Image (cartoon, grey):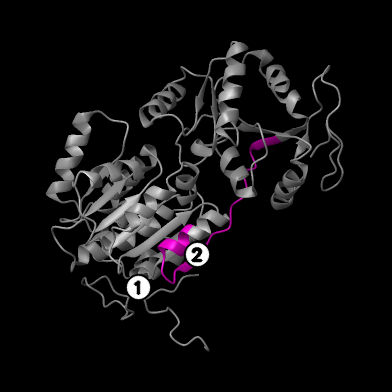
Amino acid sequence: MTFEETYLNDNILDALYDMHFEEMTPVQEKCIPEILDGYDVLGVAQTGTGKTAAYLLPILSMLDDGGFPEDAINCVIMSPTRELAQQIDQAMQGFAYYLKDVSSIAVYGGNDGARFDQEMKGLRDGAPVVIATPGRLLSHLKVGNLDLSRTSFFVLDEADRMLDMGFSEDILQINKLLPQDCQKVMFSATMPGKIRELAVSLLHDPVEVKIAVSRPAEKIQQSAYVCYDPQKLKIIQHMFRGGDLKRVIIFCGKKERVKEINRELKQMKINCAAMHSDLSQAERDEVMLAFKNGRIDVLVATDIVSRGIDIDDIRMVINFDVPHDSEDYVHRIGRTARADRDGMAVTFVNERDISRFMQIEHFLQKDIDKNPLPEGLGEGPEYKGRSARKPGGGGKGRSRHRSRGGKGRPRNNRKKGQSKNPNPAQ
């Protein structure tokens, strides 16, 4: 399905033409018509599926068509991190190139007072679209720098990461300040129970869109060590003995474990740093910049960096523990083998995580190679996977066609609060 087949307005289509965007991705095809029709949308889609355009394009098109207060903040887009907020803002600049009266301001923490003052001025002067991290937006709300009582659109991007970072109460607090008829869009890469509960609290009769998680790139060399917890650091020491440690990310499920592993690696004289939610935004920026610039060889991190971080030359990803589900596994190892490069992904599987790792193998429809434990570490747990292999073994959304002439297509007449299917019997 092409963008021309929707009723995005001409200014948006002109920008897409300049950017050589023609065919929609599946998430765009399913979400854009629904958002244009005024429905709340709950989307489950991972990074790289085109979800930013799936919500930005219809919202920008409607704002450009007019009918919204000129002196109000018409759209608020929430992002879990400064990096993602910047990426959304950059995408906004391209899509809004031909929109005269639709501008944006990015609001995020980790900056000095001068940055806060600039944000304050931009918010008070009026910005149709505000892209913000939850904590920073609340800071501006508390001092009266913005009013959300006339906001028409509210978007939560990567909601699962926001909950992982402890922003649940902030989001609910911001939601209370929005008008009842505000149209809401929520995207998450995964749909655990807490995300479902949040969706029930925020969204009204949402259209649900779920895009299947794509499997990892074939060029990622995946393997695993079936081991006990005390053996894991010794395996890392063995892996790093050759000294070629550049561009490695070690993922852990809990921030306490990240801190512990980072301390242990430093004692091994490994040039590493930790990334977790206890760090301030300024500290996270400093660590990430050092890693990008090569001043840090190994990054030990929670899933805070498993999505949306644009680093193309990661050589190896190590899962210190097995991710909770297949989606998280795909996101983690997807940090490597990017931009036509090769990469390695190694997972440590303890006796408690064997069944979970078997589920990941089932999703991948393949047996992941099991590496023999280094000499001197003894035996690991017994693993009986898809084929009981021994260690060391190989292993559509609705659309409306229209011509390119004229703006302001008639929207459907559904009112906020009216069910998408007015006749449940049909």
Residue located beneath label 1 in the image: 37
Distance, label 2 to label 1, CA atoms, is 15 Å
Viewer-proximal residue among 97 and 391 = 391
Viewer-proximal residue among 258 and 397 = 258
Number of disc labels: 2
The amino acid marked with disc number 1 is Asp
Residue 315 visible somewhere in the drawing: no
Task: Write down the quadrant of residue 182 in the picture.
Answer: bottom left
Q: Is residue 142 left or right of residue 183?
A: left
- Residue 423: x and y in percent read 46, 88
108 in magenta: no
SS at badge 1: loop
Q: Is residue 348 left or right of residue 147?
A: right
Vertical relation: 26 (above or below) 248: below
Q: What is the crowding at mark 1: few (fewer than 14 residues within 10 Å), some, or many (at least 20)?
A: some
Q: Is residue 340 left or right of residue 354?
A: left
- Residue 308: x and y in percent read 46, 41
The amino acid marked with disc number 2 is Val
The earlier-in-sequence mark between 2 and 1 is 1
Residue located beneath label 2 in the image: 209
Residue drawn at (44%, 49%) of the image: 168
| Span shown in magenta | 198-222
216 in magenta: yes
Residue 267 visible somewhere in the drawing: yes
- Residue 385: x and y in percent read 82, 45
Q: Quadrant of the N terminus?
A: bottom left
